[in-house]
Amino acid sequence: MNLSKIEEGAWKDISGRWRQLAGGFYSHGWSLELIESRIDGYFDWSKSFHHNSLEICINNLGHGVIYSNGSMVEFRPGTVGFYAISKKRLHAERKAGEYAQFVTVEWSRQALAEELKGMEEWLLPPVKAWLEGKREEPLIGPPRIMSSSLRVRLENLLSGTFSQPTLTLFAHALSLEAAAEVLFEPINTDVKICPFSPAHKLIVEKAKEYLKEHFTRSIRLTELAQYVGVSPSYLSRLFSKEMGMTIPIYIRNLRIEKAAELLKRGDYNVTEAAFAVGYSSLSYFSKVFCQVMGCCPCVYPSPKRLVSK
């Protein structure tokens, strides 16, 4: 089936352009498409929706609404959301008099199920039901504000600087990140932490690398969260779950282990070691060192020296 011709027919009434940038709905199970156009009058873009397909809309410019049976959501500039038709159709309209620019990611049910295998328990219940073929009503997900990470990916995509092989890889990554943002339970609720893109272990590893490079200075949680590309509360919970300790305790251990190394080498006295790893209070450093290492820094690495005095 020639999806391009079907899509072109759905968008033939717009004054701008529709482009399939990467993938293929029937060949790859996903398709990433770009629509750029001024909307001069009433326009129903639900003609581009496909059965057995979940579509994610990354809405950069313009306003759009999706509605069915009294349920309606609005896509505002800078938001991302999803929808899927069933036996009952969806209606989709774009606001006239605006310039619209948005990217859609169309996932076939089979391809999306394969991508999300093993992660079903973290999905929004309506999405899980749709994937399992148990939902008869149309599926409409409330749009969310794009994360800074997804926005950067979108801007890179729109820059048009990718070669086709590179674009395919980048577009697939963007498609997965968009799915991660809207198909799972929100991370600011009291649900389990969602182990999805970027992979939770990679997030923690990236955070650990940053902490190992900068532990000698004061590090704010917001700074670390911005570096790894997630919210502070999410990073805090994820780090504790993965490491079995909080971020402050991890930083403390890094500092004390480094101080112990300096003292063991004999190149630093206690005061110098404390300042070198980021402590400004010698008494507090000594207290923390004793808690972690089991002895005072003044006798490390030979606690027996305390007995001999």
Image (cartoon, rainbow, N blue to C red):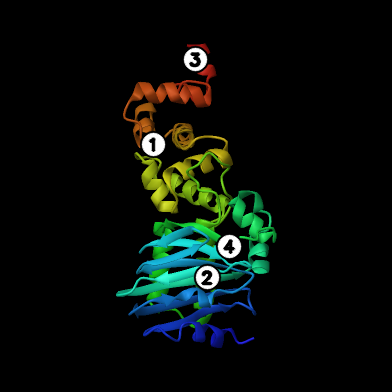
- Distance, label 3 to label 1, CA atoms, is 24 Å
Secondary structure state at the residue bearing disc 3: helix
On screen, residue 109 above or below 232: below
* Residue mark closest to the camera, 3 vs 1: 1
On screen, residue 65 above or below 248: below
- Distance, label 3 to label 2, CA atoms, is 68 Å
Check disc 1 and report the residue beneath it.
Answer: 277
Task: Kindly give the residue lying farthest to the left in the view shown.
Answer: 97
| Residue 301 at least partly seen | no
Q: Residue at x 48, y 61 (%)?
A: 81
Check disc 4 and report the residue beneath it.
Answer: 138
* Residue mark closest to the camera, 3 vs 2: 2
Q: Residue at x 49, y 15 (%)?
A: 306
Q: Position of residue 9 (x, y in %)?
A: 51, 86
Check disc 3 and report the residue beneath it.
Answer: 306
Q: Identify the amino acid type marked 1.
A: Val
Q: Residue at x 45, y 41 (%)?
A: 233
